[in-house]
Image (cartoon, rainbow, N blue to C red):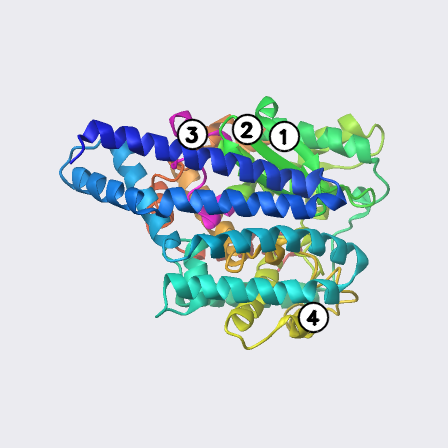
């Protein structure tokens, strides 16, 4: 049997190989969404397929399995330190999730999703669902097949949910969404009956593209990002990613007739990026680098987008940033007017532009449709009608085009079935983190109002960010909040905030 020092050296070598593949795949994917020419799709898809197959072989080969078994025994015997034990635990889980999916199947899916993203981009712009529909059916079939390979006895959608948020399930999300709907739907009805909406006139008009991009950088600096460790670009659908604490990616989309779209996209994606920039640098080239789950990641993006960005305390800070870049445009606007304008709650078509209150209803719609697709109870041809029906039932609005409907999100073109519920869960995590932060002595409003988010960042770095993938999502949230996850923090926050705004 090899000495433990040899096994640890082999563990480090494995992690370096996996890091190199992840670095290449992430960088290629980012270029594909932001700067590659239209004719680059096929070559990019082949490169991604090969990288995925090689990474799969490194992780899933018998030699790696034997190595991890020996190191697991060493961990049980107390022969590994905390970091080494975490590396072995996370690699063992990653291998278990992948080992039953053949390498060629994983490679085929990487190729398909690369091709599908390019098709989706064109379909969205052209309002052409039919051109994307066949790819969606293939993606659904592939993800269902891979889920059943991993857990033949299990509902494949359960497997996919757990992939994005370890420990979650349909029962967990059904209970969570039931609690959220019981809060949100009556509030939306009360607001409708109230018959009054704040004016958005102060944020309407034409706003120069270049100046909005400069504003984006200002907002990222306010959040606390290191711009020298970040690649910043534009794309059809805003997103972020990372390869290490020293290199994160953000891509935004500017609409010259909707400045707040970019403002809150930047605050959202900046929340993702600042999480990645503050993971322990010792994890940079290893398996512990990266956020632990989609839910925890979305808790950070939605924390900075909503709990900071849409707070009344932040309104003067945001107003100052707007005045700096758009001279004279906001001189007569008060912080309270801006606060009301960016918190206007009313049903809308596009998830990423949705207000904080109705946002979760957009997620419920996707959650329901995904279950039908993965169960084989619906196909891509059914999606536009299912989508439009649910927007009418949940939000009371008609969907005029597929571009503003079922083509609006990039996630399905990536095969990310099971991801959407984590957006709502992340919002709920954020409310509980905010309460814990205040209970821990952080003057949240004072810090935000001063435009000095350092105390908030320090708290999040200590309790969430630095741990990377070393602690599972629910234990991480429970430790940070001194108690189990409880959605009532979220529903209470929504009730108090929007009752105050609308005088309910």
Residue depicted at 30% across the width and 47% down the height: 62
Above or below — where is 426 with respect to 250? below
Asked whether the beta carbons under mark 4 and mark 1 sit within 8 Å of each other, the answer is: no
Does any portion of residue 466 appear in the rendered image? no
Q: Secondary structure at mark 4?
A: helix
Gap between marks 4 and 1 measured at Cα:
35 Å
Say if 291 sits above or below 129 in the image. Answer: above
Q: In which quarter of the view is residue 318 placed?
A: top right
Q: Are marks 1 and 2 in contact (CB under 8 Å)?
A: yes
Q: Position of residue 179 (x, y in %)?
A: 47, 65
Q: Residue furthest left?
A: 77
Measuring from the top left, give residue 213's x and y in whole percent.
74, 32
Give the secondary structure at mark 3: loop
- SS under mark 2: strand
Q: Nearer the viewer, mark 3 or mark 1?
A: 3
Left or right of residue 423: residue 429 = left
The residue tagged 4 is 384
Relative to 205, 251 lies left or right:
left
Most foreground residue, 43 or 298: 43
Q: Classify residue 106 as left or right of residue 361.
A: left
In magenta, the rendered stretch is: 277-299
Residue lying farthest top? Answer: 228
Question: Which circle's residue, 4 or 3, is located before the other in the chain?
Answer: 3
User: In the rendered structure, which disc, 4 or 1, sits on the residue that comes first in sequence?
Assistant: 1
Q: Which residue has dot 3 on it?
A: 285
């Amino acid at each position: 049997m090899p000495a433990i020092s040899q096994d640890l050296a082999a563990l480090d070598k494995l992690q370096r190989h996996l890091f190199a593949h992840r670095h290449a795949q992430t960088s290629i994917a980012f270029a594909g969404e932001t700067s590659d020419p239209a004719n680059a799709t096929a070559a990019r898809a082949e490169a991604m397929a090969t990288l995925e197959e090689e990474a799969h072989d490194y992780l899933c080969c018998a030699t790696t399995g034997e190595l991890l078994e020996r190191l697991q025994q060493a961990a049980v015997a107390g022969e590994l330190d905390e970091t080494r034990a975490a590396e072995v635990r996370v690699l063992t889980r990653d291998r278990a999730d992948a080992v039953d999916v053949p390498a060629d199947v994983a490679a085929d899916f990487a190729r398909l999703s690369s091709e599908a993203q390019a098709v989706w981009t064109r379909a969205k712009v052209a309002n052409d669902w039919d051109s994307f529909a066949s790819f969606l059916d293939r993606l659904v079939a592939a993800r269902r097949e891979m889920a059943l390979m991993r857990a033949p006895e299990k509902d494949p959608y359960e497997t996919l949910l757990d992939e994005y948020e370890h420990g979650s399930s349909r029962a967990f999300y059904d209970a969570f969404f039931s609690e959220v709907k019981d809060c949100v739907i009556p509030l939306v009805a009360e607001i409708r009956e109230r018959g009054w909406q704040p004016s958005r006139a102060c944020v309407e008009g034409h706003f120069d593209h270049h100046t909005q991009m400069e504003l984006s950088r200002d907002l990222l600096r306010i959040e606390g990002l290191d711009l020298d460790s970040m690649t910043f670009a534009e794309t059809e659908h805003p997103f972020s990613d990372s390869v290490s604490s020293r290199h994160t990616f953000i891509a935004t989309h500017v609409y010259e007739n909707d400045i707040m779209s970019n403002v809150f996209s930047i605050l959202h994606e900046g929340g993702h990026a600042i999480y990645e920039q503050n993971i322990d640098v010792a994890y940079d080239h290893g398996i512990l680098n990266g956020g632990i789950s989609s839910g925890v990641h979305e808790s950070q993006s939605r924390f900075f987008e909503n709990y900071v960005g849409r707070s009344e305390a932040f309104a003067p800070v945001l107003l100052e940033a707007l005045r700096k870049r758009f001279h004279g445009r906001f001189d007569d606007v008060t912080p309270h007017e801006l606060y009301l304008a960016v918190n206007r709650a009313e049903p809308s078509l596009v998830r990423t532009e949705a207000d904080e209150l109705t946002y979760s209803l957009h997620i419920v719609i996707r959650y329901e449709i995904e279950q039908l697709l993965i169960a084989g109870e619906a196909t891509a041809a059914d999606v536009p009608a299912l989508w439009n029906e649910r927007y009418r039932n949940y939000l009371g609005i008609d969907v005029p085009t597929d571009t503003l409907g079922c083509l609006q999100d990039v996630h399905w073109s990536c095969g990310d079935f099971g991801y959407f519920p984590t957006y709502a869960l992340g919002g709920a995590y954020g409310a509980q983190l905010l309460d814990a932060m205040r209970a821990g002595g952080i003057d949240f409003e004072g810090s935000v109002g001063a435009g000095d988010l350092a105390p908030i960042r320090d708290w999040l770095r200590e309790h969430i960010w630095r741990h990377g993938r070393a602690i599972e999502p629910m234990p991480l949230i429970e430790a940070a909040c001194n108690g189990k996850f409880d959605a009532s923090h979220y529903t209470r926050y929504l009730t108090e905030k929007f009752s105050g705004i609308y005088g309910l």
